[in-house]
Structures are given as C-alpha cells and as structure tokens.
Image (cartoon, rainbow, N blue to C red):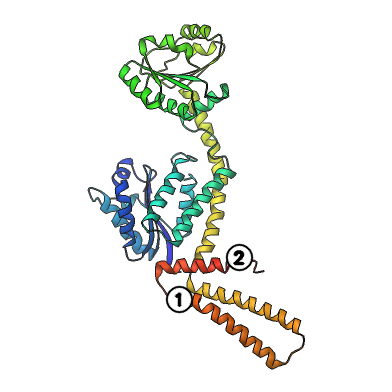
C-alpha cells in the first residue's frame, strides 16, 4: 500500500509558547486550512488539531517524504512572519508511530498534565470540523474513532485520571477528606490572586454551595465574585463573615498573617465547633501556622498541596504504563485493518472466501444427492462457479476503479459487508 498515516506538528515539548501562539489557527481559519491541505497532490485526507499546547496535521497521504515538506509549507505560511525556523521544532510520525501518537494524544498520555480530560473533547471537536468540510475519509474516520475508544478504555481500565495533580484540584481532594459533600458548604476566598482564583475555580467545579470573595481592592473582589456567582465582602470586615465559612482560601500578597489563631478561635466559637478547612496558597504565608493547633481546624499550605499533587502525579505516571500497553494493542489492531485496505489483497480475499463457501455448499449438496456421474458433477461446478462470478462482478469492478478517496471507502465497505477480516468463516 502506498498510502500512509502521517503526523506533522509541534507541541509544548518541542516549541516555546511564542511559536505555538503564532501557529495556532483561529476558528475561522480551521476549515480553510483543512481544505487547503487536501488540495496538495498526494494528501487524501487531513485534519488540523490546534490547541494551546499543540499544532498538528494528521493526514493520510502518499509519498510521505514529499508530503511532510508540503505540510510544513502550509504551517510555515500560517505564521505572520513567515519564519523558516520551524524545521527544528517539528516532529514527524509515520505509519504505526503516527497512529500511536494520535491514540496517545486522545488518551492524554502526551499532555502537559498526564491524564487531563480536556484534550479528548478538543480532539473530537477538531475531527468534527474536518469531517464537516469533507477533509477526512475512511482512514481518518477510523483512526479518530479508534482513538476515542482507546481513550475510553484507558479511563475505564486504569486510574490515570483518578488523582488530582494541580494545586487547586489537590485542595479540593484534601477538602473532600474533611467534608463528605460541598453542596451545603460555604467557602471564603481571602485575596483574589491567581492561585486563590484557581483553587476557588476547582471548588466551584466540585459544587461548593456558596462563595464569598474579599480583596484589598474591593472592585477586584466584585469582579471575581461575579465570575463565580459569589458574594463580594469588604476586606476590612471579612472577620465578621468568617464564621460562615467552612472552607477558607488565603491568596493575598500580604507580607504578614491576615488570619491568626485568635481570629480562627473567635470564628469557631460562633460556629459552635463545626470544623473549618483552611488552604493557604500564598508565599509568604497568609495564615498563622499556629492555626493548625486549634481543634476542628485543618490548615494546609502550598507545600502540602504541592506534595499531594506530586504524589498523585507519580501515581498517574505509574498508571500511564498500563495505558501505554492498551495503546500498543489498539495500534496493532488498527494497523491490521489499514494494511488490508488495498484493492488487490481485498479482491483476493473476497474471491477466496466466496470460493470456500461455494465449495462447502457444493460438497454438501453432492453428499445429499448421492452418487452422480462426472458430467453432472462438472455441470454443477460450472453452474456454481458462474453464479459466484456474476455475483462478484459488480463489487470487483467497482474496487478496480481507482478514485483514491472513494477507493478506500469501497474497500472498507466490501471488507465489512463480506466479513473479510473475521477469522471464523462459519
């Protein structure tokens, strides 16, 4: 087969963000680039994947050496400065390695954070965009859908995404050890900095019931509260609202403690001893470490959260080993299918299968008829062979018509309809 699966691209490991930004395709250009790729002589199918961490072209093409250069020209032409420095930043995967790469991307084994779920949804969206403009065909349809099923297997059969690996998600994991649910809990964000906002975002995603936001600049508190559907609180008066908070997140730029042991003890008295969970993600710390000595108060700082995230990342990487085995098995399955997508072996397999059926049925009928003469047997042979040839004439003629894009569709259809890839012919 002269066709091959080809991946040409760059990602967070091979190119800095400045290059990835310059190459990233806006929504209104994705369709145009997909169509442009399919006008390149030798590219039968193509799909662009463009996220903050990767820009890739996945293609089914002939003459891979020439096509990877022409695909690079398309990517280079998309850069505002038309720079020629992409060659050393690109990776090229071909055949099995290309399929393996696509499957690993879908399963989040090639992500900046192994096991993150966003990439699968993004990959589905980019496949849908390519399919909608007709730039994908039999091979990429099969490749993408197989990738989606691989991702599902990895999530079902491994624990690769079970453990939190960001500071924000680690905070939620630790909070879940204290509170069995978040729907009836209230959180307070003291300081609307980036780290605190990320932690608050994770809590909101986990279903926190209420969120209060306080910041030295009240307008910023209003802005963040509006984003998360929370309530802004004046910074000078946040101690009045502290007793309402089950979870307190500290994220100010203050040089000293904004939450002290005395302040927590006062809040606990009003809470009638109900527990509080405090997360200090500031450096320097915002919460007095002595708070951890107060009964029913659980204090964690950024080092604690980073330690949890690191432990969980190690666990994810161990699970990634199991996922890689799944990927390799599925690559071989796909490759068996792909390597048979050629006209000649399909015609041979079709004739052999139908001939086996003809011979089997003829022998069965002859056994039922009992002894017959050689001329009668020869007549039955000619008749059944003629029937088989007439039935096969149309599909074989269609298979021999070499329209490159349609050819793969018909080959795949014939192999499926006649079950040519099944090991059991019964």
- Residue 182, position in %: x, y? 52, 24
As drawn, the label of residue 422 is 2
Res. 291 in view: yes
Placement of 295 over or under 177, stated as above or below: above
As drawn, the label of residue 280 is none
Label 1 crowd (10 A; few <14 / some 14-19 / many >=20):
some
15 relative position to 420: left or right: left
Q: Residue furthest right?
A: 370
**Quarter location, residue 368:** bottom right
**Quarter location, residue 231:** top left
289 relative position to 218: left or right: right
For label 1, the residue is: 400
Label 2 crowd (10 A; few <14 / some 14-19 / many >=20):
few
Q: Secondary structure at mark 1?
A: loop
- Residue 23, position in %: x, y? 30, 47
Considering the image in quadrants, where does the C terminus appear? bottom right
- Residue 155, position in %: x, y? 55, 43
Which residue lies at the image location 65% right of the left edge and 90% below the top edge? 379
């Amino acid at each position: 087969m002269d066709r091959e699966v080809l991946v040409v691209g760059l990602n967070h490991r091979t190119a800095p963000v400045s290059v990835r930004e310059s190459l990233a395709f806006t929504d209104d250009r994705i369709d145009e680039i997909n169509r442009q790729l399919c006008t390149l002589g030798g590219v039968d199918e193509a799909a662009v994947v463009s996220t903050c961490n990767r820009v890739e072209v996945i293609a089914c093409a002939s003459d891979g050496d020439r096509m990877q250069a022409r695909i690079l020209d398309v990517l280079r032409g998309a850069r505002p400065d038309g720079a020629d420095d992409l060659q050393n930043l690109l990776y090229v995967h071909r055949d099995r390695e290309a399929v393996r790469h696509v499957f690993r991307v879908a399963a989040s084994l090639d992500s900046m954070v192994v096991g993150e779920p966003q990439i699968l949804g993004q990959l589905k969206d980019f496949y849908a965009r390519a399919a909608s403009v007709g730039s994908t065909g039999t091979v990429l349809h099969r490749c993408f859908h197989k990738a989606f099923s691989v991702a599902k297997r990895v999530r079902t059969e491994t624990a690769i995404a079970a453990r939190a690996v960001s500071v924000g998600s680690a905070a939620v994991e630790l909070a879940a050890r204290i509170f069995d649910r978040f729907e009836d809990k209230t959180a307070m964000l003291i300081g609307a900095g980036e780290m605190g906002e990320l932690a608050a975002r994770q809590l909101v995603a986990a279903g926190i019931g209420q969120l209060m936001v306080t910041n030295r600049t009240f307008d910023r508190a209003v802005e963040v509260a509006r984003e998360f559907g929370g309530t802004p609180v004046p910074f000078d008066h946040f101690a009045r609202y502290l007793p309402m908070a089950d979870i307190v997140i500290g994220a100010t730029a203050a040089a000293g403690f904004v939450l002290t042991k005395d302040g927590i003890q006062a809040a606990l008295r009003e809470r009638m001893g109900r527990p509080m969970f405090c997360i200090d993600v500031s450096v320097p710390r915002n919460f007095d470490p002595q708070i951890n000595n107060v009964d029913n108060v659980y204090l964690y700082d950024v080092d604690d959260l980073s330690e949890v995230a690191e432990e969980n990342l190690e666990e994810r990487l161990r699970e990634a080993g199991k996922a890689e085995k799944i990927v390799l098995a599925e690559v071989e399955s796909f490759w068996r299918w792909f390597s048979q997508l050629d006209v000649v072996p399909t015609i041979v397999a079709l004739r052999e299968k139908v001939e086996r059926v003809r011979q089997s049925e003829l022998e069965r009928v002859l056994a039922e008829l009992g002894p017959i003469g050689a001329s009668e047997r020869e007549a039955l042979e000619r008749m059944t062979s003629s029937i088989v040839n007439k039935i096969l004439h149309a599909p074989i003629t269609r298979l021999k018509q070499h329209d490159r894009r349609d050819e793969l569709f018909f080959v795949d259809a014939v192999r499926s309809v006649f079950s040519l890839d099944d090991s059991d012919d019964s």
